[in-house]
Amino acid sequence: MAYEQFAYTYDRLMADMPYDSWIAWFEQSCLSKGLNPRTVVDLGCGTGTIAIPLASKGYKVFGVDLSEDMLAVAQDKSQGAKLPASGSVTWLQGDLRDWVLPEKVDVAISLCDCMNYVLDEEGIIAAIQSVYDGLVDGGLFLFDVHTPQLLRNYAAEQPYVLDEEEIAYTWVCELDEEEMTIHHQLSIFSQEPSGLYRRTDEEHVQRAYELDWLSEQLRAVGFTNIEVTADFTTDAPNKATSRAFFSAQK
C-alpha cells in the first residue's frame, strides 16, 4: 500500500514543498468568497503538515487519510502543537471517495495533488459527490491537481536521484500516455540511529485528468462559482501549467 513505510520519511523528503503557499491560497480563496470559515476537512491530510497549522490558526480541522501510518505520524506531531482555544484537529481514517464526518464543514480541501491518486473517473465523481454532501450550503471545495503536462514532464526528465547524508533515493517513472497514468518507483535509503541505512521500496500511481472534464464533473454534482488557476497564481491555466487549482462553491 502506498505510503505504508514512506510515512516515516515523508516529512524529510517533502520539506521543500510550498506548504505556506497552499495555506495562503486557502485563506485568500475564502476571503475572495466572503467566507469566514470555522470548520475545515483536509482530505488526504498525510502527516498533517497543512491540517496542524490550520488548527493553530483557530480552525476546527478534520484530517482524513487512507493511510494509518500517515495518520500515526500526524497524531504524534499534533500532540506537540500549541493550539488556541478555538483550534482543534481530529484524525480520521477514510477514503477520498467515501467519507463521513460528525458534522458538515465550511471548507473541504484536498491539496498536494491528492486527487491524482484517484485512478478512475468514477472515483473522481464519487469524491466530488462526497465533498458536496459533506459541505454546508455555501461551503467551499478547494483542491489542486497535477496536469497531464506535468506527468509528461516527469516521464521525460526521469530518473531522479537524491543523495544526502541521512537520506537518499532513486526515483524512476513510467507514463501510460493513453490512460495518462504514471507509475513512480522509489527506493529510499534512510539512516537509522545505529548508523545503518534502511531501504524502503515504494510504488505510487497517479492519473491526470483534463481540467475541463474536472470542471464539468463539479458542475454536474451541483457546484457553482468554479474557478481554475495555475501554479499558485491568479492566471488561467495554459499548456505549460504544472499544477491547477480549483475553487468551487456549494
Image (cartoon, rainbow, N blue to C red):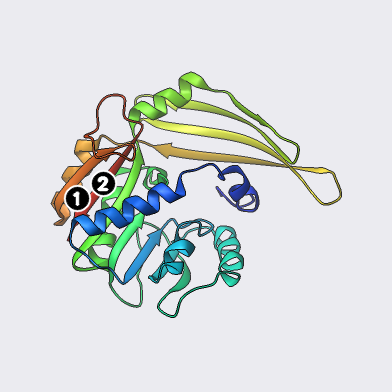
Secondary structure found at label 1: helix
Per the model, the C-alpha gap separating discs 2 and 1 is: 10 Å
SS state under label 2: strand
| Residue drawn at 38 percent across, 70 percent down | 59
Residue 71 placed where, x, y %?
Answer: 55, 63
- Residue furthest toward the top? 156
Q: How many marks?
A: 2
Classify 10 Å Cα crowding around label 2: few (below 14), some (14-19), many (20 and above). many
Name, please, the residue furthest toward the right: 194
Question: Which is nearer the eye, 83 or 228?
Answer: 83
Q: Residue 218: which disc?
A: 1
In front here: 179 or 147?
A: 147
Q: Position of residue 6 (x, y in %)?
A: 62, 48
Q: Is residue 223 left or right of residue 196?
A: left
The residue depicted at 37 percent of the width and 24 percent of the height is 177
The C terminus: image quadrant: bottom left
Q: Are marks 2 and 1 in contact (CB under 8 Å)?
A: yes
Kindly identify the residue that appears in the image at 38 percent across and 46 percent down: 118
Q: Position of residue 236 (x, y in %)?
A: 21, 34
* Residue 206 in picture, x, y percent from top left: 43, 38
Residue 48 visible in the snapshot: yes
56, above or below 226, in the image: below
